[in-house]
Image (tube, helix red, strand yellow):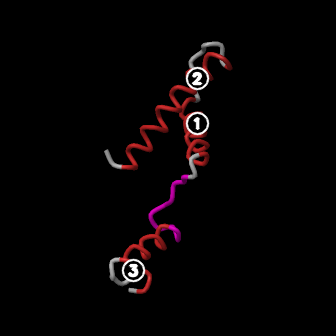
Amino acid sequence: MDETTRILQDLLTRAAAAHGVHEQENLGGVYDEQWPQWYAAHMSATLEDLGLRVLSADSDAALAAEDSAREELGETPQTTQ
């Protein structure tokens, strides 16, 4: 299992457990029709707590990291090609 899949699986598992508690304690056992929004908010908060964040592939940070890796391999950085 790759790292991204492992992180997503962990986030979903944590959200599912917490959401079950939320439905019981805050909604009186009623099905939460807004569960996708709740899961997204919970998963975002968990990512932040873990010191992680989602970056778009074209973000400056992602490009900088890729360029750094290329330089370590002796390749020309993407941003200077």
Residue at which label 2 appears: 32
Earlier in the chain: of badge 3 and badge 2, it is: 2
Q: List the single residue furthest toward the front.
A: 72
Name the main secondary structure of what is drawn in magenta.
loop
Which residue corresponds to the image point at 51% horizontal and 59% vertical from the top-left?
55
Q: Give the range drawn in magenta.
A: 52-61
Magenta-drawn stretch contains 35: no
Locate residue 4 relative to residue 40 in the image: left or right.
Answer: left
The answer for how far apart the CA atoms under marks 3 and 1 are is 40 Å
Q: Is mark 3 on a helix, strand or loop?
A: helix
| Secondary structure at numbered mark 1 | helix
Residue beneath label 3, please? 71
Residue that mark 1 sits on: 37
Question: Residue 74: horizontal and vertical position, in percent?
Answer: 33, 82
| Gap in angstroms between the C-alphas marked 3 and 2 | 49 Å
Q: Which of 78 and 31 is in front in this view?
A: 78
Type of residue at label 2? Asp
Q: Which amino acid does label 1 sit on?
A: Gln
Above or below, 54 against 19 in this view is below
Q: Residue at x 47, y 67 (%)?
A: 62
Secondary structure beneath dot 2 equals: loop
